[in-house]
Image (cartoon, rainbow, N blue to C red):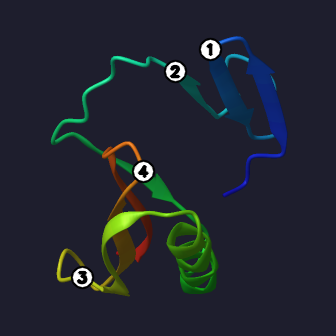
Amino acid sequence: MGFAGEWRGEGAFSFQAEGKFPRLTWFGVIEDPTHIANATRLAFAVDGIDEVDRLAEIVRSAGATNIEGPGNEPYMRTYYAIFFDDPSGNKLEVYFCEE
């Protein structure tokens, strides 16, 4: 998904794209053993349909549940996505779109 860097600490980790702050794109997680999943969905954009398909294979092999797709969605002319829950029940999406 374009994250070239990775950092891991006690109880937290993050992935970073190439670049410098404040424009650095990154995604971080603080691990909480008392976390309760909710209905909030996090969506990650990728550069193409092939990348959605590649990540869909990883999603399946990583133990995701409630997998829908990948496939075209009616949101716009091209919106190709996979929807799933991670093993902790968090709702996630990987998508590619063209307007």
Dot 2: element:
loop
Amino acid type, residue under disc 3 in the picture: Glu
Q: Which mark is residue 87?
A: 4
Disc 1, disc 2: CB below 8 Å? yes
Q: Which mark is residue 79?
A: none
Give the label on residue 31, or none.
2
Image position, residue 8 (x, y; %):
77, 23
Residue that carries the numbered disc 3 in the rendered image: 73
Task: Identify the image quadrant of the N terminus.
Answer: bottom right
Spot occupied by residue 36 in the image (x, y as percentages of width and height): 25, 27
* Disc 3 to disc 1, C-alpha distance: 36 Å
Instruction: Determine the residue positioned at 23% across, 78% down.
Output: 76
Residue 11 circle label: 1
User: Do residues under tags 3 and 2 come within 8 Å of each other at their CB atoms?
Assistant: no
Which residue is rendered at x = 54% and y = 84% of the image? 49
Specify few, some or many for label 4: CA neighbours under 10 Å numbering under 14, 14-19, or 20 or more.
few
Q: CA distance from mark 1 to mark 2?
A: 5 Å
Q: Earlier in the sequence, mark 4 or mark 1?
A: 1
Label 1 or label 2, whichever comes before in sequence order: 1
Between the C-alphas of marks 4 and 2, the distance is 13 Å
Q: Residue at x 71, y 11 (%)?
A: 10
Q: Is residue 75 left or right of residue 23?
A: left
Task: Establish if 63 lies above or below 91.
Answer: below
